[in-house]
Amino acid sequence: MRALKGRTRAGRRNKMAQTKKIRVGVLFGGRSSEHEISLRSAFTVMSAMDPARYEVVPIGIGRDGRWYWRADAIRMLADAAPRLEALAGGGIEVSLLPHPAANALVQAPAELARSLGYPVFVKPNALGSSVGISKVKSERELGAALEEAFAYDRKVLIEASCIGRELECAVLGNERPESSIPGEIVIKGRHEFYSYESKYVDPEGAEVRIPAALNAAQSEHLRQLACGAFRALGLRGMARVDFLARPALSEIYVNEVNTIPGFTAISMYPKLWEASGLPLNRLIDRLIELALEEHRERAALKITYEIKG
C-alpha cells in the first residue's frame, strides 16, 4: 500500500512538472503619484506567486512611461519597495505588440531596428510620395527618423532594407482585377532611395523603366502576385502594388499596396496602364465604370433588419 501511494505521489509530481506554466505579466510603476506604492504592491504579488505554476514576466513602467522587462525584478523591488523609492533604471526596453493574436512583447524601436539589421527604413504608416521616410544607417540616427515619421502619422513602420530592385504593377478591377505590365524604378545620382526629392524635386533623381527588364515568365509572375495582393486585401477599383526584389529575383517581397496611387503626369499608375494599352482617357472611363459598379452592388444591400416572429 505504501509503495503504491509512493508511486501515486511520484506520478502526480511528474504530471505537475509536465504541466505548462501559466505566463503572467505583472505591470508596476507608471506615470502616477502612486508609482512607489505600485512597486510595493507588485513585490507582494510576485512574492506570493508559485514559481512551479507561473512564469512571471515583470514589466516595470518608468515615470517617463517607458516599459522595461526586469529579469531582476524581485531583487530590485525588495530593495526599492520598503523605502518607497521609484523604479530604478535598467532592464530591456519593450512594448506590447498591438496585434492581439501575437500575444507577445517586442523590443522597443532601438532593439527592433537592431534585430532587423541596419540600415532600416522608418516611414509613416499611411502616407504616400515618400513623405517622412528616412533611411537609418545606425542607432544614433533612429531617434530623429522616428520623430520625423511621427510628425506625419500616429503609427510608424520600421522596415528591413532590401538591396536589389524596385518593381511596380498597376491593378484595376473589382471582383476580377487585372494587372498592368511591371515597371521599374532606378535610383540615380546622389539619392540612396526613392525619396520625395528624387521623385519630384531632382529631375535626374530617378529613372522609370516601362516595361521593366524582365522575361515573360518573371513579368507574368509579378502580375499574378499583384492581383493576388489586391484580392487578399479585399480592394476595389485601383491600387499600385510595389515590390522589392533581389537582383536576380530569387526573392520577391510585396513592399506596400497604394490604394490611392499618384495620378500626376509622371506617376507610375497611369504610365503603366498606357504602356499596357490603356490610355489615360480610357483608364478614367474604366475607373468610373468600376465606381458605378461598386455603387450598384452596395445599393442592393439591405440597410434595415426585420425582426422575425
Image: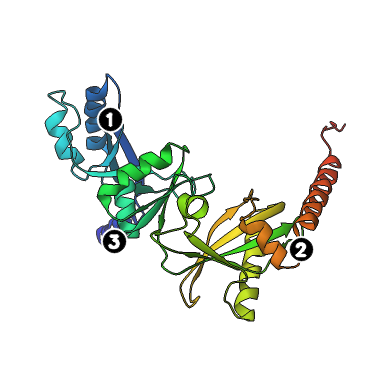
* Residue 233 on image: x %, y %: 63, 54
Dot 1 or dot 2: first in sequence order is 1
Q: Amino acid at mark 1?
A: Asp
* Residue 181 on image: x %, y %: 66, 69
**What is the secondary structure assignment of the residue under circle 2?**
loop
Q: From the image, state whether disc 2 or disc 3 is nearer to you.
A: 2
In the picture, the quarter occupied by the C terminus is top right
Q: Amino acid at mark 3?
A: Arg
Q: Residues within 10 Å of mark 1 (few under 14, many from 20)?
A: few
Q: What residue is at 76 percent from the left and 63 percent from the top?
A: 278
Q: Residues within 10 Å of mark 2 (few under 14, many from 20)?
A: some
In the picture of the structure, the residue carrying the numbered disc 2 is 278
Using the rendered view, name the quadrant where residue 171 is placed.
Answer: bottom right
Contact (CB < 8 A) between labels 1 and 2? no
Q: Is residue 54 above or below residue 186?
A: above
As drawn, the label of residue 249 is: none
